[in-house]
Each structure stands twice: as structure tokens, then as C-alpha cells.
Image: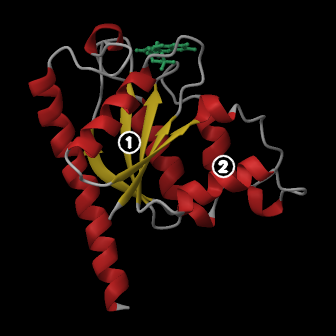
Amino acid sequence: MIRIAILSASVRTGRRSHRTALFLKRFIQERQLAEVDLIDLAEYDFPVFHERLKSLEPKPPVAVEFARRIVSADGVIIVTPEYNGGYPAALKNVVDLLYDEWHRKPVAICTNSDGSFGGMQVITSLQYSLWKIRAWTVPALFPIPKLATTFDENGIPAEPEAMEKRAGKFLDELLWCIKAKALMAAQG
Ligand SMILES: Cc1cc2nc3c(=O)[nH]c(=O)nc-3n(C[C@H](O)[C@H](O)[C@H](O)COP(=O)(O)O)c2cc1C
């Protein structure tokens, strides 16, 4: 079965974008679209890394474990908040930690904000960083606006039908890329 990692990028006390990660996890599991590994940066509570993992000595076991989870995923969904028009430092910390691990990894970006635009300003900077490290950024948008009222604390949407329709389109694009990559790999 396809494995999708959901990287929940807010480590903020009282964070709300994690609700989106919980929604996506349940959405994927209920439809048996893939196995889901929810990677929560708040749980890792990483320090700022002084080097990329491949050059870091000694290698912290938790960082090695984080890398393993990214490597073993067929595709990654990054659920990120928008902070001052960009993505959070905690996310940049782990994007830069890895290098080969991101290579040709299908990555779909889900942006979040309390405002009306759903964190759309993050797309350009995050997509560019991922492109620079040779990830496969999936051309799909899933902006989540007005987070405070869009989901409850468990990720249950206020308007399930509309949210599920949007999530389905977003997932379709990621799954297509994952399957296209698998086909290419099978052909050698
Ligand atoms: C440092 C900081 C900067 C923020 N900047 C923006 C912003 O530029 N645009 C916006 O719509 N919301 C902004 N917000 C509000 C977030 O969208 C809001 O906190 C939302 O719930 C997503 O972040 P969270 O997952 O950390 O809760 C900011 C929040 C913080 C803490």
C-alpha cells in the first residue's frame, strides 16, 4: 500500500494548523487511499541544527529516525502555517536538515492561516526551497483559511462536504505523482 507522511509543521503553543493534519489523516485512512504516518514537529521539538544530517556528528538518533520516516514515505504532505508571509523556522530547520532524502520525493503543500487567504503566500518560498533540493513538488493547492472556525480541535470540518471535495482533488494530484514515479521506477 502507498505510504503518505503528513508533516505537521507548527510547533506553536495553541497551534491550529495541526487540525488540518488531523483532518487529512482521517480523510486518507477512511478512504484507504494510503497508510498514513503523521510526523508532528511539535513532538520532536528539534533544536536548530548546526549542520545537515549527513555532516552532523554525532548524529542525533531522533534526527536519524525523522529522516527514516521521510525516506520511507512514498509521498509527503506538508501542512504549514503562514507566519509573516513565510513558513515557520521549525519547518525550514528540517527541510535543510535533509538533502538526498528529499530527492524526487513527491511533496504536496497545504497552507494554513487564520486570515482569508489560507496562507497562500507560503507557496512560493516553500516550493522554491523544495525545488532547490530536488523534491518533486506537486502542482496542487490546498489553502485553508479562517482556521479558527474551519475545523474543530479534532480536525472535524465545519462544512464537511465542501472540505472533502477539495481534499479529494488535492490528494488525487499527489497520488497521481506517486503512481507515476512508481511506474517510472518499475521501467528502470
Ligand atoms: C509569528 C506569526 C506570524 C503570523 N503571520 C501571519 C500572516 O502573515 N498571515 C496570516 O494570515 N496569518 C498569520 N498568522 C496567524 C496564523 O495564520 C495562525 O496562527 C494560524 O492558526 C496558523 O498557525 P498555527 O498553526 O501556528 O496556529 C501568524 C501567526 C504567528 C504566530
Residue 118, how many percent across, how many down?
32, 22
Q: On the rendered structure, is 159 left or right of 54?
A: left
Q: Earlier in the sequence, mark 2 or mark 1?
A: 2
Q: Is residue 52 left or right of residue 119?
A: right
Tell me the quadrant of the picture where the C terminus can be found. bottom left
**According to the image, label 2 marks what residue?**
96
Q: Quadrant of residue 50?
A: top right
Is 109 placed above or below 153 here? Answer: below
- Residue drawn at x 51%, y 16% is 15
Above or below, 74 relative to 30: below
The residue that appears at 48% across and 56% down in the rendered structure is 131
The front one of 3 and 13 is: 3
Outermost residue on the right side: it is: 58
Q: How many marks?
A: 2
**Residue 5: which numbered mark, if any?**
none
Question: Where is residue 87 drawn, in percent x and y?
Answer: 52, 30
Residue drawn 59% across and 63% down?
101
Residue at the far bottom in the pictured view: 188
Q: Nearer the viewer, residue 73 or 104?
A: 73
Q: Position of residue 162 (x, y in %)?
A: 11, 26
Q: Quadrant of the N terminus?
A: bottom left
Q: Residue at x 75, y 57 (%)?
A: 53
- Give the residue number, with chain letter if any, for mark 1: 109
Task: Please indicate, yes or no, whether residue 87 appears anywhere in the rendered image.
Answer: yes
Position in image of residue 104 (x %, y %): 46, 67
Q: Amino acid at mark 2?
A: Asp
Q: Secondary structure at mark 1?
A: strand
- Crowding at dot 2, Cα within 10 Å, few <14 / some 14-19 / many 20+, comes out as some
**Label 2 secondary element:** helix
Residue type of the residue flagged with mark 1: Ile
**Alpha carbons under labels 2 and 1: distance apart:** 16 Å
